Amino acid sequence: MSRPAKTHKVKMMEQQLAKKLTRQVVGSLVGCVHCGMCNDACHYVLAFPDDPKMTPSYKADQLRKLFKANFDWTGKAIPWWVGADKAPLTDDDLEVIKDISFGTCTNCRRCTLSCPMGVDTATLNRIMRGLLSHVGVMPEGVRVVSKDQWELGNQMGVLKEDYVDTLEWMSEELEEDLGHGEAAIPVDKAGAKIMYCINPREVKYDPRTIKEAALIFWAAGESWTMPSEGWDNTNFGLFSGDDGLGGVSARREYDKARQLGVEKIVISECGHGFRSTRCEGVNWAGEQQPVPMESAVMTMLRFIKEGRIKVDPTRNPERVTFHDSCNNARSCGFYEEPRELLKLVTMDFQEMYPNRAENYCCTGGGGAMSMSEYTPRRLESAKVKADQIRATGAKVVVTSCHNCVDGLSDLIKHYGLGCEVKQLVNLVANALVLDEVKEPEAVPAPAEIEVAPVAVASPLAGRKILVVDDEDDVRLFLTTVFEDAGAQVLTASDGDTAVAVAREHQPDLISLDLSMPGKDGVETFVELRRTPETEEIPVCVVTGHPEFRQVIYDRPVAPPEGYLGKPVDEDKLVAYAHHIIEHREAKVH
Amino acid sequence: MVEQRVGQKTIRLVRGDITEMEVDAFVFDITEDVKLGSGFGGAIQQRGGVAIQKQLDTIGSCPTGEAVVTEAGLLKASWIIHANGPKFREEDEEAKLASAVRAALARAEEKGVKRLAFPPIGTGLYQVPLDLCTRVMVDTISEHLSDGASLEEVLIVAPDDREYKPFAARIQEGA
Ligand code: SF4
Ligand code: SF4
């Protein structure tokens, strides 16, 4: 049977592949003897043991076929033997490979450890992703996020003014907590010793980690700053295989560090951020003299060892375990320091097994969190990770990676493990012992002075908030929290009512659950955004389910203004609501 | 300053965020379905308001190599020229890129634009080779300016050194 003609896209991929064939890559391409020794290393194989398409060698074979058909003599001499006669030819073939490359491998590199031939399957898979992205064949989430990073300098599309606003917000909160403004976050401070770079997830959905880091830097008396640009330590080029994006993103950070004249870049706790900024970015960007860089884990550990901060581990008494990010542990050999730090700030640490370089992926790696179409498979492949965590009996899973925080949070909910995920920065900040502030001596008030009653803080006074949740108890809880903060609260228990109430009453904010029966929260969210009377009402998503990732990454409409996971922290909820409403008003004016 | 004089007109290379430029119009590299999407499209929606996407929805589509115009909402510019450049190594990318640049210039002239800003079209996510983009854009713009245009100044807004350096070289070659 004659094979179809090769499409333009396939030809472009072949041309691009020629540029990627280094000695190491060719070694991995020709080295596999299909012995199957790596199979059980892969969490996808463990979850789907009867599916040969989950084996590492099958995934890497997709690139091998293209290589053999075009660049290797065996492909000419014995094409049927080496698979060259099954190399992709049509655009439909590329769609199939897209689902294999992006949807069945998190590029975790665990299989590499088991391969006697030294085959690096994840590297081959990353190259395949790069070839596909080169011709525009990629999941929607990857396209959306990559475009943000290329054009706006960070992978969550955070605008510069919103980033700076969040830093100011956290500085204000620190001032409230400490009673003085000395811990305010310095932005673009030339000559500071440290430039602190973060994951955009912190700005968008977890700004408390920035505040905690600022508190630690202040307590240590460190000279530090955050840059107004070049601040994103993550790099979607690592996931999409686009070395151009990898180089440009890394270079922005290095250039900013040189411009500010800092001694060192400190990378907040993010596995892929650490790997791409500290390890791979230097090559992608063609750096001759890289700026010194370290993980924030090292910085915090150093502060304790040098006596610059004091910590009290009894403040973190619950049992914790540690999840090694694949990028930190397996790809960068970075696994002892987080343990050393963890033992200094917690009371009950329990290892999970296997660990360090042999740890299993959280299943959110390789950009998987941004590919919502593969969520069910991802969660199924997470079973081995869930078993690992369950066996520790820990109440808290600690990890030094924002991506893992999301991956682990999803699987903990999916498997009902009932534990929380924290990062070392959370635990160090919680254990931090600040010098005691002396209480002024009590002076009795003269009898004739009447003490006026202190007004209860009502940060949401005069605000109208719509609470949308199908669960009665959650709705009641959220209503009480908002009412206690002074807001007028409207409620809806399903999507249609939510849109109708929002249209009629024009609330200042909508708090929206994403998993509801009937019209689900994602549909409701999209409808709110597409309805002229409601399109500009800010939305804070409050959810316990991974559907949320779809609105963040695929972004069918503009993303929500805020996000909180369940169970909801009351203070956080009120602070978020207050900030979102104020921020919107400032923008409009 | 990197610039090229073409008679009384100028092509100038600058660094910055194109959606915040004080120009009469700037160019956005749009897809055929005229959805603003993420990246600069996300910045346009967030800073410029929802009216821009609505105007695009009314227009409906824009084939590769062509360009359409909307107002710029709350942004500093008056107009956004949405040009559909070649994407992801599609066939005839040089001809399609030249056509998209010419279409953008034509739409600008129709609106009486004096200062127009272009991004390096397609060199990021869309994988248009930098050398091709630099050559085609600089040559097409300077040809247009030498041909009795009423545009006075065309800015090329390079986001990074990666684009700035080759554009600077090409612009200075013709200066
Ligand atoms: S890199 Fe990880 S996910 Fe991919 S095949 Fe190997 S073990 Fe499986
Ligand atoms: S990658 Fe290595 S371990 Fe896996 S099948 Fe091939 S040779 Fe065997």
Image: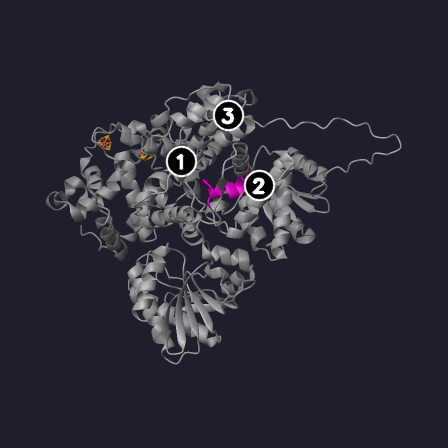
**Which class describes the residues within 10 Å of circle 1: few (<14), some (14-19), or many (20+)?**
some
Q: Amino acid at mark 1?
A: Glu
Q: Which mark is residue A180?
A: none
Label 1 and label 3: CA atoms lie apart by: 25 Å
Label 2 and label 3: CA atoms lie apart by: 30 Å
Q: Quadrant of the N terminus of chain B?
A: bottom left
Label 2 and label 1: CA atoms lie apart by: 23 Å
Quadrant of the image occupied by residue A241: top left
- Mark 1 and ligand 1: say if the CB distance to the nearest ligand atom is below 8 Å: no
- CB-based contact (under 8 Å), mark 2 and mark 1: no
Is there any visible trace of residue A350 in the rendered image? yes
Who comes first in sequence, dot 2 or dot 3? 2
Task: Mark 2 vs mark 3: tell me if same chain.
Answer: yes
Q: Which mark is residue A294?
A: 1
Q: Quadrant of the C terminus of chain B?
A: bottom left
Q: What residue does disc 3 label? A: A396
Q: Nearer the viewer, residue A400 or A142?
A: A400
Q: Amino acid at mark 3?
A: Val
The answer to whether A31 is drawn above or below residue A98 in the figure is: above
**Which class describes the residues within 10 Å of circle 2: few (<14), some (14-19), or many (20+)?**
many
- Mark 2 and ligand 1: say if the CB distance to the nearest ligand atom is below 8 Å: no
Percent coordinates x, y for residue B67 in the rendering = 42, 68
Who comes first in sequence, dot 2 or dot 1? 2
Task: Mark 2 vs mark 1: tell me if same chain.
Answer: yes
Which region shows up in magenta? Answer: A191-208
Chain identity of mark 1: A
**Which class describes the residues within 10 Å of circle 3: few (<14), some (14-19), or many (20+)?**
many
Q: Amino acid at mark 2?
A: Ala
Total residue callouts: 3
- What colouring does the structure picture have? one colour
Q: What residue does disc 2 label? A: A184
